[in-house]
Amino acid sequence: MPCWAPRRHVRDRQALLDALAITGFERLESQVRRTLDGAGEDFPARLRAAVNTFVRFATDNAALLELMFSSKHREGAEDVRAAAEPGFALMFGLITQGQESGDVASGDPERVSIVLVATMQGIATLINGDMVDVSLLDELTDRATDQFLRGAGPA
């Protein structure tokens, strides 16, 4: 039985790592898109579903997520950055939808999206680093989503 030999398909180690990062971004975007497609029209439900999907992906694929986000900042990684864009555009579009519906405060949607992504990655980092038990994942993502929607003030 023939085996797949990476050296025949990629030019070097960095190309292999980039290919893995690209595949990771494509998988993440696909999973979030499928989640949003099935989440209905209610913005808070859509946001909660997207956040849960992202954080679940990030905790189920910790090493891949680290590779994805470190690779896209490397000089010469245009293909990796291009693969990351659809997922970021998806989150940007979700924030824009929330602003249009009045569920998210107005402001630069890109900056608001950065805060949301940083929150999601922060939760994943805490869980992946064993600083927070994975059993708290759903509670943390729900709380983060609620807090994002209403701000840090009292409910």
Image (cartoon, rainbow, N blue to C red):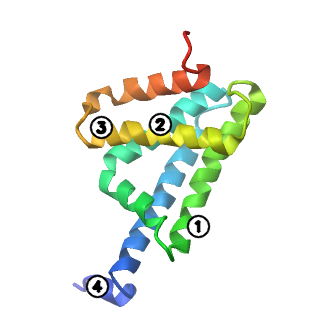
Q: CA distance from mark 2 to mark 4?
A: 39 Å
For disc 4, the marked residue is: 5
Of badges 4 and 3, the one in the foreground is 3
The first of marks 1 and 4 along the sequence is 4
Q: CA distance from mark 4 to mark 3?
A: 34 Å
Mark 4 or 3, nearer chain start: 4
Q: Which marked residue is nearer to the observer: mark 2 or mark 4? A: 2
Confirm or deny contact between disc 1 and disc 4 (CB under 8 A): no
Residue pictured at 52% horizontal, 27% vertical: 145
Q: CA distance from mark 1 to mark 3?
A: 28 Å
How far is mark 1 from mark 4, CA to CA?
26 Å
Residue 70 occupies quadrant: bottom left
Tell me the SS state at disc 4. loop
* Of pointers 2 and 3, the one earlier in the residue sequence: 2
Q: Which residue is mark 1?
A: 82
One can see residue 53 in this view? no
Of labels 2 and 4, earlier in sequence is: 4
Image point 32% across, 51% down: which residue? 62
| Residue ID for mark 2 | 119
What residue does disc 3 label?
Answer: 127
CB atoms at circles 1 and 3 under 8 Å apart? no
Q: Using the rendered view, name the quadrant where residue 92 is placed.
A: top right
User: Callout 1 environment at 10 Å: few (<14), some (14 to 19), or many (20+)?
Assistant: few
* Mark 2 residue type: Thr
Q: Are marks 1 and 2 in contact (CB under 8 Å)?
A: no
Point out the tag, 1 or 2, that comes first from the N-terminus.
Answer: 1
Contact flag, marks 2 and 4 (Cβ < 8 Å):
no
Q: Secondary structure at mark 1?
A: helix
Percent coordinates x, y for residue 3 in the rendering: 25, 83
